[in-house]
Image (cartoon, rainbow, N blue to C red):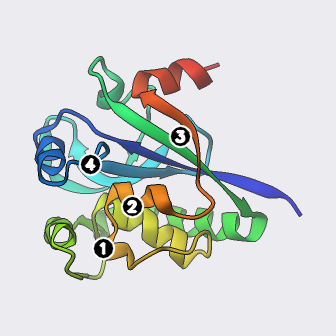
């Protein structure tokens, strides 16, 4: 049986929103994204659509090679790999492609992120924050069992998901240096 690798990237940028989350939680990582195409991505997440503006935000594709995150600032990161079966990988790919094709119908859940901080369940159809999106995708497609509801998972909570193994930890630029061809 063939195995496929899914990549989960946790980061903490110097944006105002990321700094607020970091101050409120003390977590070393404040953003989560997922890739099905390798450690360089592209990665998908719920985040700002334009580098200079926090809003609007929604489902975005993050390209590490050209990302504003990889521009020059120090961005702490942790890259995880998760082995999944071919069937799970195909479900993940299909769900992600369907969501991304309809990305204008999806929105960032600011209220959901705030509720998560207070450990309160808050869900709205087609609204996600970054770690909720990654966790929901993993759960819905059978890739991982979660310790709690995706709407209650902060990026750091993904570190404890069974089956994830750290393949790189350090600065985001070092991911590019390590895997760039």
Q: Where is residue 59? Give x, y as percent.
A: 34, 58
| Number of the label disc, if any, that sits on residue 27 | 4
Residues under labels 3 and 2: Cα distance?
21 Å
Q: Nearer the viewer, residue 122 or 26?
A: 26
Vertically, is 136 above or below 15?
A: below
Residue at coordinates 41% horizontally, 28% vertically from top-left?
172
Between residues 97 and 151, which one lies in front from this camera angle?
A: 151
Quadrant housing residue 66:
top left
Q: Which quadrant is the C terminus positioned in? A: top right
Between disc 1 and disc 3, whose residue precedes? Answer: 3
Of helix, strand and loop, which one carries label 1? helix
Residue 13 shown left or right of residue 19 in the figure: right
Q: Mark 1 highlights which residue?
A: 152
Question: 10 Å neighbourhood of mark 4: few (<14), some, or many (≥20)?
Answer: some
Q: Which mark is residue 157?
A: 2
Residue 7 pos. (x, y %): 57, 48
Residue 65: x and y in percent read 45, 26
| Rendered image: mark on residue 3 | none
Residue pictured at 49% horizontal, 52% vertical: 34
Which circle, 4 or 1, is nearer the viewer? Answer: 4
Q: Is residue 76 above or below residue 159?
A: above
Separation (CA) of disc 4 from disc 3 = 24 Å
Q: Position of residue 42 (x, y in %)?
A: 50, 42
- Determine the CA span between mark 2 and mark 1: 9 Å
Q: Are marks 2 and 1 in contact (CB under 8 Å)?
A: yes
For residue 174, side relative to residue 52 (left or right)? right
């Amino acid at each position: 049986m063939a195995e496929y690798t899914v990549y989960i990237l946790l980061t903490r940028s110097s944006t105002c929103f990321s700094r607020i989350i970091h101050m409120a939680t003390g977590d070393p990582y404040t953003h989560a994204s997922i890739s099905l195409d390798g450690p360089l991505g592209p990665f998908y997440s719920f985040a700002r659509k334009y580098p200079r503006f926090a809003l609007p935000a929604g489902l975005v594709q993050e390209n590490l090679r050209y990302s504003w995150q990889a521009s020059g600032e120090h961005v702490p990161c942790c890259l995880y790999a998760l082995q999944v079966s071919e069937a799970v990988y195909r479900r993940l790919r299909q769900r992600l492609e369907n969501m991304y094709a309809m990305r204008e119908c999806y929105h960032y859940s600011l209220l959901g992120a705030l509720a998560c901080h207070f450990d309160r369940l808050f869900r709205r159809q087609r609204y996600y924050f970054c770690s909720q999106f990654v966790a929901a995708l993993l759960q819905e497609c059978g890739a991982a069992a979660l310790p709690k509801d995706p709407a209650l998972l902060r990026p750091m909570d993904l570190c404890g998901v069974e089956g994830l193994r750290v393949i790189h930890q350090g600065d985001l630029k070092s991911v590019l240096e390590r895997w760039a061809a």
